[in-house]
Image: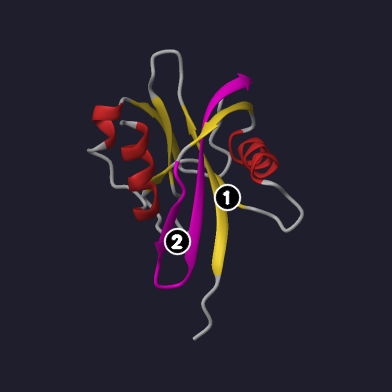
Amino acid sequence: MIFVMINVVCAVISDHDERLLVCKRPLGKALAGFWEFPGGKVEADEDFITAIKREIREELACEIEVCMDLPRVEHHYPECSIRLWPFICKVSRGEPVAMEHSELRWVTLEQCSNLKWAPADIPVWKAFSC
């Protein structure tokens, strides 16, 4: 078996009320119906900041400011392994729109514990809450 680690970025986007933007994975995709932070795979020619800005433009049709990074997460799914690079961000232009997700929601940290999370994203919101 060949072990491949995929680099993935995600944005922990907060608003002025300190709520977090979470996205529901659509039907037909892996982990459909699970909640996650928006983001995606890093392209071969990208650094992590470029990748997260591109992913947010593609997925949410808005621009972000990257404020700081959170501890990376390695997670092993049956079909692949990912190294997740989370960044705390703010929307700098536009309003997030669900381009690839079935739903977007602004939630408080307390509400995060009630969501059905994609497993790799659980340590991300827990790190943010510390």
Q: Residue furthest bottom?
A: 1
Q: Which residue is mark 2?
A: 30
Identify whether 45 is placed above or below 39: below
Q: Which residue is mark 1?
A: 40
Give 32 or 117, whichever is nearer the viewer: 117
Q: How far from the left and from the top, in percent, is residue 71?
A: 44, 44
- Disc 2 secondary structure class: loop
**34 sits left or right of 60 in the view:** left
Query: How busy is the neighbourhood of tag 1: few (under 14 within 10 Å), some, or many (20 plus)?
Result: many
Query: How busy is the neighbourhood of tag 2: few (under 14 within 10 Å), some, or many (20 plus)?
Result: few
- Dot 1 or dot 2, earlier in sequence: 2
Looking at the rendered structure, the kind of residue marked 1 is Gly
Q: How far from the left and from the top, in percent, is residue 67?
A: 56, 26
Per the picture, the main secondary structure of the magenta-coloured stretch is strand
Q: Where the C terminus falls, by quadrant? A: top left
| Rendered image quadrant of residue 41 | bottom right
Magenta stretch: residue 74 in it? yes
Q: Residue furthest right?
A: 45
Residue sitting at 62 percent across and 27 percent down? 64
**93 sits left or right of 9 in the view:** right
Identify whether 109 is placed above or below 17: below
Give 129 or 28, whichever is nearer the viewer: 129
- Disc 1 secondary structure class: strand
Point out the stretch of residues depicted in magenta.
71-93
Q: How far from the left and from the top, in percent, is residue 1?
A: 49, 86
Residue sitting at 47 percent across and 66 percent down? 81
Looking at the rendered structure, the kind of residue marked 2 is Ala
Magenta stretch: residue 7 in it? no
